[in-house]
Amino acid sequence: VLNSICFKGLTPLELNIFFSMIYRLKDNETNEVVLTFDEIKTLSQYDKSRRDPTRFKNHLQNVYNKILKIDFKIETDEVEGFGNLFSHFLISKAEPIITMKVNKEFAYIFNELSIYTSFDLLEYTTLKSTYSKKIFTLIKQFEKTGWVEIKYQEFRELLDIPKSYRQTNINQFVLKPIKEELTPLFKGLTIRKKYGKGRGKPVIGYRFTWKAEINHADDFSKGKQEDLRIKLFNIEHNGELTQKEK
């Protein structure tokens, strides 16, 4: 579901913060979760040289305000419609913490996040382009298949590509950063345009292919390997340790 949503208006920094928060929510579903500013900063690789707490608080408020404008679809056997992702999102005035709770209608979204590991989040937060971030999550969804196709108009809407962009602009400002940033993360990544018939052979879609993971023999999302990866991640981003201690 998250991969079908355009996170319109969120900057790369705000996306890092948002996905760090929902990563922590994925094992709690509709339970209330309390997060410290430091925890979110660590997970999102927020620049700790920005010591102004007001500035970080503003980032959190921006994330919430922008997410609030996104319609999350509700569909059951009885009803269909739209609602807000969070039932509440509270920023403490007394201490640097936030308290969040997901609306019960959207608990299923967080069940889908079980495929994401702390290492996936670490890779995600290193990406500078919002376009790369969206395709990263899409590839993760289909990682074992080795390919995914997106229709042209869906591609534009999903990545929130400016209406003024022609194919040459898409090549330079969308596809190029995606290829440059994601090739080191997905072996053999290629991007092919699919052309339609008729005059000028218009582009009708894009096909992304990569070397699929066959058996996840070295999958860090399993058992002790994931525990080790989390420990290494926490050590690397522990601001209280010197470089020598790390």
Image (cartoon, helix red, strand yellow):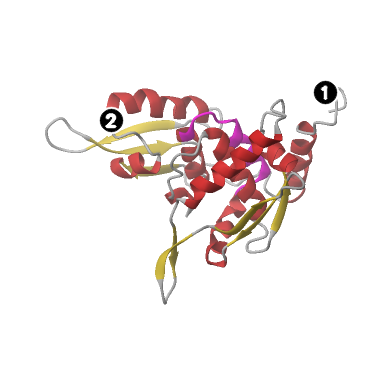
Q: Residue furthest left?
A: 199
> Quick one: SS at disc 2?
loop
Amino acid bearing label 2: Ser
For residue 85: magenta? no
Q: Residue at x 34, y 25 (%)?
A: 171
Marked residue nearer the N-terminal end (2 or 1): 2
Q: Tell me: residue 93, above or below residue 136.
A: below
Magenta segment's dominant SS is helix
- The spot of residue 153 in percent (x, y) is 29, 42
Q: Nearer the viewer, residue 190 or 25?
A: 25
- The residue to which callout 1 is attached is 243
Q: Is residue 188 visible?
A: yes
How far apart are the alpha carbons under marks 2 and 1? 47 Å
- The spot of residue 65 in percent (x, y) is 52, 47
Amino acid bearing label 1: Gln
Q: Residue at x 41, y 73 (%)?
A: 79
